[in-house]
Structure formats: structure tokens, C-alpha cells
Image (cartoon, grey):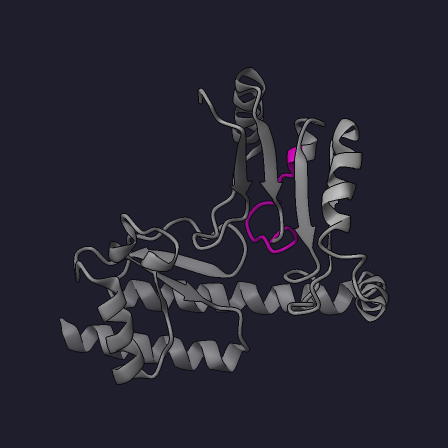
Amino acid sequence: MAGLDGLIVASPANPTGTMLDAGELRALSEACRVADAALISDEIYHGIGYDRRAVSALEVTDDVYVVNSFSKYFSMTGWRVGWMVVPPDHVRQVERLAQNMFICAPHASQALALAAMDCTEELNGHLDVYARNRTVLLDGLARAGLTRIAPADGAFYVYADVSHLTDDALALSQEILADAGVAVTPGLDFDPHAGHHWLRFSYAQGAEAIAEGTARLVRFFEARR
């Protein structure tokens, strides 16, 4: 890690939905300390987990920059309101940087964010929908022959290896859209080196739409066999 100024980690991650456990975060924190590098933890998908809880980097170290948002768990995508937790000795530097980008989040966004924090029952209802959608999609992809999948621990994505089908995930995603009417994301959007072997599937939709989309994907891949 020589010459490294900072390390950004995201857990749960996009596009994979994978999560780091406490031991892994602690090891990264220690490696950054040894390298005199900043650790930046993107926790924007916290709250959207299934078989286990997402661990915050703040649980293993205070020497970390944590970035979070109301966009995902709180279902406020587009309102552009979030927060940071910053080591005390860098608060003023971050304030100076922020004030040259914006004054503050719009008042309406702040008011709605406060209201969203009292909507636990509704938000957990969204999480129940995601969990059911996740099961439907994973089962469907297995029937479609897509079994080389990153663990979908959190967020609302499945990242599948399609290297046994193609060397061009972009072309495959275009074929799926044209023939099945389902939009999927080629891995090249996230990884310019190995992304041509991966597709990302999102299940952040209503249960009916995910069930229909999954059925279409199953038919599409079965027809290609």
C-alpha cells in the first residue's frame, strides 16, 4: 500500500451486494494506519441487509471517514441529502471543502429526511419486499443457469458471472433488452478490465415487476441453451 493516500470501501457494495465483516474492516483499518492512508467507508446501503447486519467501520475504528445517505434505505433517491462522520482533526478541512461546493442541503430535503427517520415500519416493509424479490431473482437465475454469483448480502443487486456464455456482457445485455424486454447492467459499467464477463441485476422494484422480469430472463436463457 506504499504511496496510497486513501482507500474507499463500500459495504454493502454496488454492483455485487457483498458485505465486509468486522474482521475484514478491522484488517483494512490497520493496513491504512500502517500506510498512513485515509480509510473512507461508503455505507450508503446500510439498513438493506438480509442474513446478517452490515457492520459500520465506526465499530472497529474512530479513524475513518464514513459517508451515508438517505437515498437507499430511507427511499429518498434524488433528494441528495446525506451525512458524513469525520475524524475530529479533519472536521474543519471538510467544512471548508463543503462550503465551496454547497451551502447546505435544501430545507425541503432536510425536513423530509427528518420525517423519514420516523417511518421505520414503512421502510422495513420495503426491506421485506427486497428480501422476497431477492429470493425470486436468485431462484430464477439458478433455473436460467446463472449460478456463479457474488453473495448478495445486502443492497438490492445480484452480480453474475456470464463468462461461460459470452466475452461481451454489453452485447448480451443489449440482446436481453431487445428479446426479453428486461434491462440489466453490463459489468463494464463498474469494471473496465473484467466487466465484460459480468452482468448486474437489480431487484429494487415491486414484487410483480421482479417476478415478471425474472420469468422473462428464465425464458431468454433457456432459449439460448
Q: Report whether residue 218 is seen.
A: no
Q: Is residue 95 left or right of residue 30?
A: right
Task: Give the residue at the far top of this rendering.
Answer: 34
Task: Give the residue at the far left of this rendering.
Answer: 225
Does residue 56 belong to the magenta stretch?
A: yes
Q: Is residue 13 above or below residue 117?
A: above
Q: Report whether residue 133 is seen.
A: yes
Quarter-wise, where is residue 199 in the image?
Answer: bottom left
- In the rendered image, residue 65, in percent from the top left (x then y), is placed at 67, 36
Q: Is residue 59 above or below residue 17?
A: above
Q: Is residue 214 above or below residue 47?
A: below
Q: Residue 131 versus residue 154: which sits nearer the camera? A: 154
- In the rendered image, residue 35, in percent from the top left (x then y), is placed at 52, 19
Q: Residue 135 versus residue 105: which sits nearer the camera? A: 105
Quarter-wise, where is residue 225 in the image?
Answer: bottom left
Quarter-wise, where is residue 169 in the image?
Answer: bottom left
Q: Residue 154 versus residue 43: which sits nearer the camera? A: 43
> In the rendered view of the protein, which quadrant contains the N terminus?
top left
Main secondary structure along the magenta-highlighted residues: loop
Q: Residue at x 78, y 35 (%)?
A: 91
Q: Residue at x 27, y 75 (%)?
A: 174
Q: Residue at x 23, y 69 (%)?
A: 172
Q: Is residue 179 above or below residue 87?
A: below
- In the rendered image, residue 212, in percent from the top left (x then y), is placed at 41, 82
Q: Residue 168 versus residue 49: which sits nearer the camera? A: 168
Question: In the rendered structure, which segment of residues is drawn in magenta?
Answer: 45-57
- In the rendered image, residue 176, in percent from the top left (x then y), is placed at 28, 76
Does residue 203 belong to the magenta stretch?
A: no
